[in-house]
Image: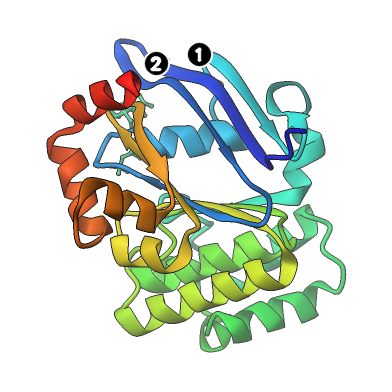
Amino acid sequence: MNDAVIEVRHLAKHFDRVQAVKDVSFSVAPGSICALLGGNGAGKTTTLSILLGLLLPSSGSVRILGEDMLAHRYQVLPRMNFASPYVDLPHRLSVEQNLGIYARLYGVRRLRERIRTLARDLDLEALLKRRYGTLSAGQKTRVSLAKAMLNHPDVLLLDEPTASLDPDTGDRVRGYLMDYQASSGATLLLASHNMLEVERMCDSVIMMHQGVIVDQGRPAALVQRYGHRDLEEVFLHVARDGQDTEIRSRAL
Ligand SMILES: Nc1ncnc2c1ncn2[C@@H]1O[C@H](COP(=O)(O)OP(=O)(O)OP(=O)(O)O)[C@@H](O)[C@H]1O
């Protein structure tokens, strides 16, 4: 029986002449944290956007929580959420107003209590009355994460979840996400450039290079397979030697 929470098969996406994602297939197990890794332009954000239904694929299929996302995404989206530093919220509204609007859109019950809890957990209490547009990049990242947690998602997609966070705040946010995963059983898929973060948080890693998957596995297994000291070195190896790695992985 196939019980993957995220099941991607032969996914491709091109923008005019740019082939952003080429025949990508992978699955993410329930209750796991999986990382999409790859250099700039590898196709991570495009893949996450297709999973969310924000972009239509050129070909291929995506099943999430057992549903075909192309045919039935509105049945699945209430159980998902997404955080990204690239998605902006209305600048003139306060943090509290922004979270309140999303909470109503998601049909969150006892929304004031939910916002208070998230503000406490993500250190946003002092910012609730501030206009979103006046926040620093790291503060916006935390608000985006709070928005993503409003509906207690079963599937959480995160594009660089700790971008712009200082080391202390980044560490606390990672701890928060891991605690959430452990207590809720949710499945997390994140794109990250932070290899220490990935080694600490993730059960599995999917390495992309120029739109294709060049390798995947558990972080420790990848480090061992490439004979490096850590995932950072594996990343550099794949980024600088991506084409060869792609050819080798296809030959396996
Ligand atoms: N709307 C678009 N129109 C044309 N090309 C696009 C568009 N969106 C993405 N691309 C191209 O598709 C490729 C993959 O981009 P994508 O944003 O998915 O990469 P990424 O792995 O998320 O990179 P980064 O780490 O820099 O965020 C890139 O070559 C990018 O220029």
Please give the label number shown on residue 14.
2
Please tell me which residue is depicted at 51% across the width and 78% down the height of the picture: 175
Q: Is residue 129 above or below residue 77?
A: below
Indicate how the structure is coloured in the image: rainbow
Mark 2 closeness class: few <14, some 14–19, many ≥20 residues within 10 Å: some
**Outermost residue toward the left?**
240
Question: Mark 1 is on which residue type?
Answer: Ser
The numbered mark, 1 or 2, whose residue comes first in the sequence reads: 2
Q: From where the camera sits, is residue 168 visible?
A: yes
- Residue 187 rendering spot, x and y as whole percentages: 64, 54
Question: Mark 2 is on which residue type?
Answer: His
Is there a contact, CB below 8 Å, between mark 1 and mark 2?
yes
Please tell me which residue is depicted at 52% across the width and 62% down the height of the picture: 144
**Nearer-the-camera pick, 201 or 13:** 201
Mark 1 closeness class: few <14, some 14–19, many ≥20 residues within 10 Å: some
- Residue 50 rendering spot, x and y as whole percentages: 54, 31
**Nearer-the-camera pick, 35 or 245:** 245
Label 2 element class: strand
Q: Is residue 107 above or below residue 235?
A: below
Q: Classify residue 96 as left or right of residue 55.
A: right
Q: Is residue 235 above or below residue 40?
A: below
Q: Quadrant of residue 171?
A: bottom left
Q: Quadrant of the N terminus?
A: top right
Question: How far is the residue under mark 1 from the one under mark 2?
Answer: 6 Å
Mark 2 sits near ligand 1, with its Cβ under 8 Å away: no
Mark 1 sits near ligand 1, with its Cβ under 8 Å away: no
Please give the label number shown on residue 58.
1
**Outermost residue toward the right?**
109
Q: Quadrant of residue 245?
A: top left
Q: Classify residue 223 as left or right of residue 104.
A: left
